[in-house]
Amino acid sequence: MSTSAKYAGAAERWSERQYADSVAYLRHRAELIVSLGPRLEPGDRVLDLACGDAGLADFLHPYDYVGVDASEEMVRAARARGAQAELADLNDYEPPKPVAATTCFRAIYYAGDRRAFFRRVAGYTEKKLVFDLNPRQYDVDDVRADLAAAGFDRVALRPFFVPQTRALPAPVAALLRIAQRSGPLARAALRLRFTYLVAGSRS
């Protein structure tokens, strides 16, 4: 099945339907894109690979956002939100000029060759690559090695404890965000669920 066929009829309001509390989920993701690893400055260009409907763009207003997706339906939905979006496969795309940050969420498995993908991204990314990683699916040390081979020799990891499918009361959500920094407790939680956000950058 082609990517376009997969999302036919499903792209409109994709973000709102994918996340029980899309505002909390995407806002926190955006906060970490800015702060994890080298900090972004207003006006920095952010390239969002596999952007879907570009729901993330709503939370990156001080930055120059451009999304890329392989689904025509998703690109149309992103543009309908007012986001700049282009149709392309993340394995092949290269922007016309360098970007400060490249992001790739819920899509790293689309990379045909992960190390080659990181190398391609490193060629046009000036500050950092940010993506999510399920530590129960991928070995973190293997991913670190692939990043280092691409020139991203500095790696920052942050647990991401915002549920995708359940909206939490504000006090519980606040406690989970504190737990993201709790070392052993966070690592224990990651053995069962949740993901890391990873920022790869250069020394």
Image (cartoon, rainbow, N blue to C red):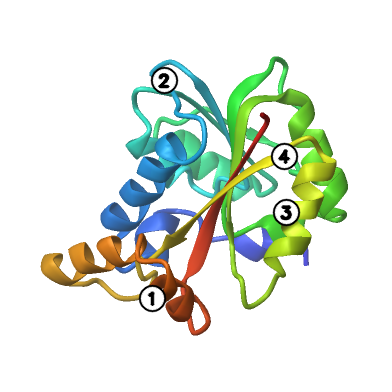
Badge 4 vs badge 1, beta-carbon distance below 8 Å: no
Report, in whole angstroms, how far the alpha carbon at label 4 lies from the one at label 1: 26 Å
Q: Which residue is mark 3?
A: 144
Q: Tell me residue 151's x, y (percent).
A: 78, 35
In the displayed structure, 39 sits above or below 188; it is above
Q: Which mark is residue 185?
A: 1
Report, in whole angstroms, how far the alpha carbon at label 4 lies from the one at label 3: 8 Å
* Snapshot quadrant of residue 203: top right
Which kind of residue does numbered mark 2 sit on? Glu
Q: Nearer the viewer, mark 1 or mark 2?
A: 1
Report, in whole angstroms, how far the alpha carbon at label 3 lies from the one at label 1: 22 Å
Q: Tell me residue 33's x, y (percent).
A: 46, 40
Q: Which mark is residue 166?
A: none
Badge 1 vs badge 2, beta-carbon distance below 8 Å: no
Badge 2 vs badge 4, beta-carbon distance below 8 Å: no
Q: Which residue is mark 2?
A: 41
